[in-house]
Amino acid sequence: MMSNNENQRSSGILNSLKKLIFEDDQTSSAPQSPAPAPAAPTQEKLNTPTPAYTSVTQPVATGKTPPPIPITANDGSTDLKEMKLKVYAILEKLNEQGVDFFEVWNAAAAMGKVEENTLKAAYTSLKFVDSSLSKEKLVATGTNYANKLKETIAKESNQKQEEKKRTEQDRTMEIANLNSEIKALTENITKLQDDLQKKQVALGQINEKYEPKIKEIEQKIAIGNAAVGEVITEINNALHMINQSIT
């Protein structure tokens, strides 16, 4: 298990470059503090033999594949500075043993700004630490790190393109489903409106429909009552005559 000191040495290698991300917004007229001495490489790097580099046209093959740290992770990060911090995290995992472009680059940043003077000063200082350091080695290792980053972002870009394609397909499918549902609802609404109109018309004609029958029934009741009244009158008359004439 690694000690706390070893953990600290193995992480945060590009602290100076990371710090510069948040200092870019400062005005150039601001007074610069004295440039600190370049950061010395860790003992682990010094004790590890460094490979020889003889060509700058062919990047050194490190055998490392891009680490599984997504640059464009789905964590809601959209700020460029935050993305650059993620890229630096990948670089830290790609860092090779020995003193190379990585250490010179960061040492130059520790001096306040990565430019010709600080790069040259960092290179001169670190060459005393590791005599194998050379211009060719810097160019080769720097090119190699850049290529590895390109591989990482290319792979992830392809994955994101696939994700984008799936998302667009989901959108197209959902649009089609919603349009179908809207069409069905619209047709149903049209039918309901037509039914409503018919019911309203029927309601308006309801009295006209039933009034004749109601009047007919009323007339039959009246005639029936009249007929019964007349017959009862006739019976009463007959009974009166019987009472008068028959003893």
Image: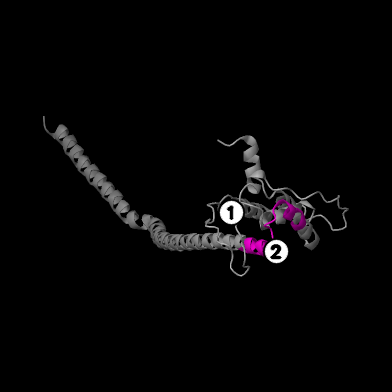
Is residue 21 among the parts visible in the rendering?
no
**Location of residue 237 by image quarter:** top left
Residue farthest to the front, as pictured? 131
Q: Amino acid at mark 1?
A: Leu
* Residue corresponding to mark 2: 135
Nearer to us in this view, 52 or 12: 52
User: Badges 2 and 1: C-beta atoms under 8 Å apart?
Assistant: no
Q: Provide the secondary structure element on which disc 2 rests.
A: helix
Is 44 placed above or below 213 here?
A: above
Q: Measuring from the top left, give residue 90's x and y in whole percent.
A: 60, 53
Q: Measuring from the top left, give residue 26's x and y in whole percent.
A: 81, 54
* Residue corresponding to mark 1: 94
Packing grade of label 2 (10 A; few <14, some 14-19, many >=20) is some
Please give the name of the residue rendered at 83% of the width and 51% of the height, measured from the top-left corner.
Answer: 35
Nearer to us in this view, 14 or 118: 118
Q: Measuring from the top left, give residue 166's x and y in whole percent.
A: 46, 61
Residue farthest to the bottom, as pictured? 57
Magenta segment: 123-143
Checking the image for residue 198, the label placed there is none
Q: Find out whether residue 188 is within the magenta segment.
A: no
As measured in the structure, the alpha-carbon distance from the residue carrying label 2 to the one carrying label 1 is: 20 Å
Secondary structure, magenta segment, majority class? helix
Q: Amino acid at mark 2?
A: Lys
| The C terminus lies in quadrant | top left
Q: Find out whether residue 137 is within the magenta segment.
A: yes
Is 2 placed above or below 32 here?
A: above
